[in-house]
Structures are given as C-alpha cells and as structure tokens.
C-alpha cells in the first residue's frame, strides 16, 4: 500500500496561475500534482547540467531530422 503525505507550502499567486496555465489544470492541487509527477519523470532533472543536456539533445535531434530530409 502506498503511503500518502499531506504537504503545504507558500507560493506566489502569479506562480500558481502560471503553473495552472502551463499544466492545463484549473485547480491548484491538480496543477501541483502534475508538475511534481513531471519533475520526477523528466530525464533532464537527473543530470548536473540540465539545460545544457536538453539543448544538446534538441540540436542533435534537429540535425538528424535535417540530415534525413536531405537524403
């Protein structure tokens, strides 16, 4: 059986509104749950230079797509 913990935090209203818009959720609880789930599953949160790694992957993917279009 999974353990469940109730947590609380203080966030700016603007941050909550932005999170709701980005996640597509209308209530705070669902927006936070979706954001936490994404953070835990995202491959980029586990590496030291998250943004560098993500950018390298995007560039490599785009380069590969361009190469395939040319051939």
Image: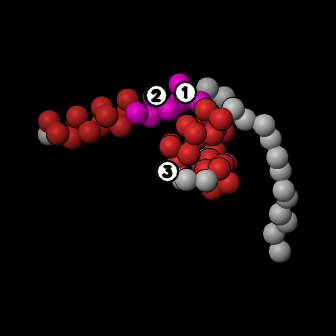
Q: Are marks 3 and 1 in contact (CB under 8 Å)?
A: no
Q: Looking at the image, which residue is at 17% across and 39% down?
A: 69
For residue 24, the mark is 3
Q: Which residue is mark 1?
A: 51
Q: Which quadrant holds the C terminus?
A: top left
- Cβ atoms at labels 2 and 3 below 8 Å apart: no
Magenta stretch contains residue 57:
yes
Q: Residue at x 44, y 34 (%)?
A: 57
Q: Between 60 and 27, which is closer to the camera in this rendering?
A: 27
How busy is the neighbourhood of tag 3: few (under 14 within 10 Å), some, or many (20 plus)?
few
Residue 6 position, x and y percent, is 84, 56
| Residue 34 in view, yes or no | no
Alpha-carbon span between mark 2 and mark 1? 6 Å
Which element is circle 3 on?
A: loop
Residue 59 lies within the magenta run? no
> In the structure shown, which secondary structural element does the residue marked by tag 1 occupy?
helix
Residue positioned 85% across, 65% down in the render: 3
Residue at screen point 83% across, 50% down: 7
What segment carries the magenta color?
50-58
Q: Residue furthest bottom?
A: 1
Question: Can see residue 48?
Answer: yes
Label 2 to label 3, Cα distance in Å? 25 Å
User: In this picture, is 46 found above or below 48?
Assistant: below
Q: Is residue 62 left or right of residue 45?
A: left
- Determine contact: label 2, label 1, CB under 8 Å: yes
Q: Position of residue 54 (x, y in %)?
A: 50, 32
Q: Nearer the viewer, mark 2 or mark 3?
A: 3
């Amino acid at each position: 059986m999974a353990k469940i913990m109730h947590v609380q935090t203080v966030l700016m209203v603007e941050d909550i509104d932005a999170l709701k818009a980005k996640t597509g959720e209308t209530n705070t609880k669902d927006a936070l749950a979706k954001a936490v789930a994404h953070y835990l599953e995202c491959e980029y949160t586990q590496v030291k230079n998250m943004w560098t790694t993500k950018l390298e992957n995007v560039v490599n993917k785009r380069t590969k797509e361009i190469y395939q279009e040319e051939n």
